[in-house]
Image (spheres, rainbow, N blue to C red):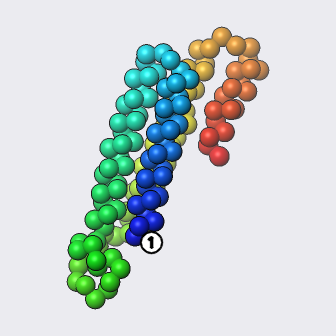
Amino acid sequence: MYISFVFYFVTVAALKMSILWLYRRIFATETFRRVALISMVVVVIWFLGVGLTDILVCLPVQSFWNPTVKGHCLNFDLFFLVVGIIETVIDLFILILPVPVISTIQLPPRSKIMLYGIFLLGGL
């Protein structure tokens, strides 16, 4: 369980970074690329912070899996609640990031709605 949490955060951060790199490649405006780069920095900083906290959730670390070792652990419920809320906010931001750019593209309304739908499918 201890290792699976670390793998979970690595996987989620890699997924978010890959989506942001895809966005940077598709939308070449300088403003969008800057916003995407700032988003990447936020994702990396969040990953490092939550990853380090996850690794050091119990001090000493052995007290996580060995109850005979005296130590102190964070409140897991509160930790994962806060992580879940912040992850959701980051996900929503990444999901709506291309919407302003799509709105400026000169397409017929039907095509624009279909394009919005394609990008918003990521919300599933």
**Residue 22, above or below 86:** above
Residue positioned 41% across, 67% down in the render: 3
114 relative to 79 in the view: left or right: right
Q: x, y (%) of residue 65?
A: 35, 79
Asked if 55 appears above or below 38 in the picture, the reply is below
Q: Nearer the viewer, residue 36 or 22?
A: 22
Q: Is residue 59 left or right of residue 106?
A: left
Report the residue at 35% width, 36% height from top.
Answer: 41
Between residue 88 and residue 15, name the one nearer to us.
Answer: 15
Number of disc labels: 1
Q: Residue at x 44, y 47 (%)?
A: 13
Q: Residue at x 43, y 53 (%)?
A: 10
Above or below, comparing residue 87 to residue 117 in the picture: below
Q: Does dot 1 land on a helix, a strand or a loop?
A: loop
Q: Residue furthest right?
A: 110
54 sits left or right of 84 in the view? left
Q: Measured from the top left, where is residue 66 in percent x and y?
A: 32, 83
Q: Report crowding for label 1: few under 14, some 14 to 19, many 20 or more residues within 10 A (C-alpha).
A: few
Asked if residue 49 shows in the view, the reply is yes
Q: Quadrant of the N terminus?
A: bottom left
Q: Is residue 29 above or below residue 13?
A: above
Q: Position of residue 42 (x, y in %)?
A: 36, 39
Q: Which residue is mark 1?
A: 1
Would residue 100 be seen by someone viewing this image from the given angle?
Answer: no
The single residue placed furthest to the top in the displayed view is 106
Amino acid under label 1?
Met
